[in-house]
Each structure stands twice: as C-alpha cells, then as structure tokens.
Amino acid sequence: MPREQGQKYIAQNKKARYDYHIEDTWECGMVLTGTEVKSLRQGRASLVDGYAAVDGHGEVYLYNIHIPEYSQGTWTNHTARRTRKLLLHRREISKILKETNEPGLTLIPLALYFKDGRAKVEIGLARGKKTHDKRQTIAQREADREMARQLRARNRGR
C-alpha cells in the first residue's frame, strides 16, 4: 500500500486567531498511542481549551486537547484529555522557553493534521487581544469582503 502524501486537516482552532495575536508558529510531532491515532484518522479532535508549556526538564507538553476514545478500542483505550509530549528540536525548545518567559505570551495549538501520514500539531506563540482589537479584526474582515464583492461585480460587468 502506498504511503500517504500531503496534508489532511483534522481540527483547527479558529477562535484562537480571533482571540490572540499570533507572533510565531512551529510545527511539532506528537507522542501518541495507537488508539489516539485511530481516533484522529476518524477526524475526531478538539483544540478549544488546549495549551502547551515547557516543563522543568526542557520538554514541551500539550494539555487539554480532547481526542475522544476510539469506539472499537478495548481496555487499551486512552483517556480523552491526557497530557501529550511534543517533539521539537532542542534549539526550538530553548527559543520557545525564552519567549514564553515574557509576560502575556502563551503557547496555543492552532491546527492538528496528518502530514505524509504522521500526526502533527501547529502551535503558536500568542498574545491576547483586547476588545477593541477584536472589533478592528471584524471591521477589517468585513471591508475585505466588501472589496471582493465589488471586484466580482466589476469583473462580471465586462
């Protein structure tokens, strides 16, 4: 059987881009059990309350990611919200550690996907937005939509 190619998205944290300014992103591998991979292949996961942190030993862990139990799993099934280790290079971990020590910055998961058959998570260094920033984001999005509508209408007129 040929190996999987390309990216297949499982879950995206759309609210994160609305609630936070994303300053930097990293692609990480994850240490998963067999039933977690099978559950992800069914397209079931939630990133809503998730966050990542560097522990005292210099390793990055992902917390509160919900991967539901595999429906056909037996006693070997995993717990849905267990802590999962992320796989990063040492220099990336040291950069993340240095940047998260700054007040107001946190690591949040942005997307969960399969890349060439391997489960990956995209984490982002995030700073919280204020209420007026969120309003500005909405206004910008609506202005972009209106410009696109005008361009479509103009191009149809030819």
Image: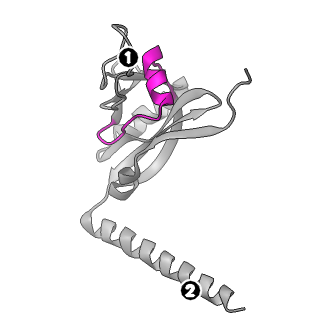
Q: Taking the image as drawn, is residue 7 in sight?
A: yes
Per the image, is 108 magenta? no
Mark 1 residue element:
loop
- Amino acid type of the residue tagged 2 in the rendering: Gln
Front residue of 126/9: it is 9
Reading the image, the residue beneath label 2 is 150
Query: In the shown orientation, is residue 127 left or right of residue 94?
Result: left
Mark 2 residue element:
helix
In percent of width and height, residue 141 lies at 44, 71
Front residue of 111/46: it is 46
Q: Nearer the viewer, mark 1 or mark 2?
A: 2
**What label sits on residue 57 in the rendered view?**
1
In percent of width and height, residue 76 lies at 37, 8
Whether residue 12 is situated above or below residue 157 in the rendered picture? above
Give residue 99's quadrant in the image: top left
In percent of width and height, residue 38 lies at 48, 22
Query: In the shown orientation, is residue 7 left or right of residue 112?
Result: right
Query: Residue at horizontal 30%, vertical 26%?
Result: 81
In this view, the residue farthest toward the front is 72
In this view, the residue farthest toward the top is 75
Front residue of 132/148: it is 148
In percent of width and height, residue 28 lies at 52, 31
Q: Taking the image as drawn, is residue 33 in sight?
A: no
Disc 2 crowd rating (10 Å Cα; few below 14, some 14-19, many 20+) is few
Per the image, is 41 magenta? yes
Query: In the shown orientation, is residue 106 left or right of residue 38?
Result: left
The image quadrant where one finds the N terminus is top right
Using the numbered discs, state the Cα–Cα distance from disc 1 to disc 2 in whole angstroms: 55 Å
**Magenta residues, start to end:** 29-50
- Amino acid type of the residue tagged 1 in the rendering: His
Give residue 84's quadrant in the image: top left
